[in-house]
Amino acid sequence: MKWWCSATGEPWTWAWRPYPGVWIFVGLLVASYYLWVVRPAHPRPSDSPEPDSAIRGRGGHLGPNRRAALSFSLGVLAIWLSLDWPIGPLGAGYLASVHAGSYILLSLVAPALLLLGLPRELLLWAAVKSPVAPALRFLARPLIALAVFNLILFATHVPDVVDTLMPTQLGAFAVDLGWLLGGFTLWWAVLAPSPEVARMSPPLQMAYLFAATLLPTIPSAFLTFASYPLYGVYELAPRVTEMSAQSDQQVAGLMMKIIGDLPLWFGFGMVFFRWAKASEGKNPTHPGAPYPSRG
C-alpha cells in the first residue's frame, strides 16, 4: 500500500487505489477546523456588534458564518481532489498536464479558499500572539511573499528536481506541501487581517496580484515551446492517452498560464469591486475613512 501518490513507472490502470496518507492529511485539516473554529464558537448576541478588531486567544474567537465554512470546505475539497486518486497518481507520474492541474489547485485555489474560510479573529491571533506570528508578519510583506511563491514555483519545476523527487513518496509529498505553502504565502499578503498585518491599499493589492501573473510565464513558456520533453518521469511513463509526452507537456504549459492566471484575476476583480463599493459608501464628511478589511 502506498501512503502518498508518486511516480511508479507501472502501466496505468483505472482500478481505484487507496492513499491513506492523503486521507490523514485531509482529515487533519477538517479536524483542526472543527477544533479551532467550529467548536469554540459561541452564540453572538443579536444586539451587540461583532468585535471586528479584537484579538482573541485560542478558543475565544467567533465561529465561521456559512459563507466562510463553505469556502473552507471547498478549499479542503480542492486539496483532496488534487492529491487523491485519480488526479494524484496521474499527476505524480503519468501526465504533466495533470501535474499542472494539481499545481493550480494546490497553489492558487485551495490556499485562498482556506484563508477566506478562517475567522478574522483567528488569523489576527495567529499573526500577533501565536508562536509563528513573527514569520506570518514577515511573509505578509508583498515583495517577500512574491519572492517566496516564485522561488517555490521555479524550484519545483526544474527538470532535475522533478525527476528526483516525484518517484519517491516523500519527495512527491515535499512538492505538494511546497505548493501549498507557496500559495498560502502568496494569498496571505492580500487576505491577512488589515491594517494590523496586511498593509496594502486596494490599488497596491491589484498591482500585487497582477505582478503574481508575470514570472510564472517563464516556466509555462518553457513547457509550451520546448522542442523536446523536459521531464524524464513523464516522458518515460506508460502512456495513459494517445497524446505524446511533448504534446502533454505543451498542454501543461498552456494550463499553467491560461488557467493558472484565472484565480489571480478573480482575486483582482474582487479587490476592485470591493474597493469601488467602499468608495461609493464612504461618508462624505469623513473622506479619510479606511476601506473595510477582508474580515
Image: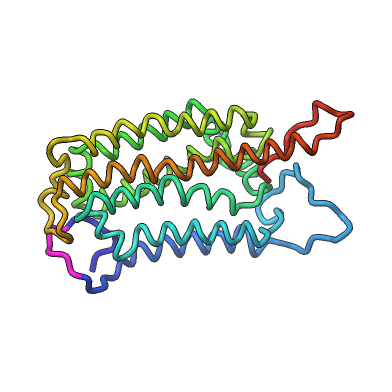
Relative to 257, 248 lies left or right: left
Where residue 218 sits in the image (x, y, percent)? 31, 31
Where residue 186 sits in the image (x, y, percent)? 48, 37
Magenta-colored stretch includes residue 252: no
Residue placed most toward the observer, 68 or 266: 266
First to last magenta residue range: 8-13
Where residue 99 sits in the image (x, y, percent)? 28, 51
Task: Using the image, determine if residue 45 lies above or below residue 161.
Answer: below
Q: Which residue appears at 29% of the width and 70% of the height?
A: 18
Examine the image and state in which quarter residue 46 appears: bottom right
Quarter of the figure with the N terminus: bottom left
Relative to 166, 41 lies left or right: right
Magenta-colored stretch includes residue 11: yes
Relative to 36, 157 lies left or right: left
Residue placed most toward the observer, 138 or 113: 113
Residue placed most toward the observer, 21 or 284: 284
Where residue 21 sits in the image (x, y, percent)? 34, 62
Relative to 285, 211 lies left or right: left
Q: Which residue appears at 24% of the width and 38% of the height?
A: 224
Q: Which residue appears at 31% of the width and 34% of the height?
A: 154
Magenta highlight: main SS: loop
Q: Which residue appears at 51% of the width and 63% of the height?
A: 30
Q: How many marks?
A: 0
Examine the image and state in which quarter residue 280 appears: top right
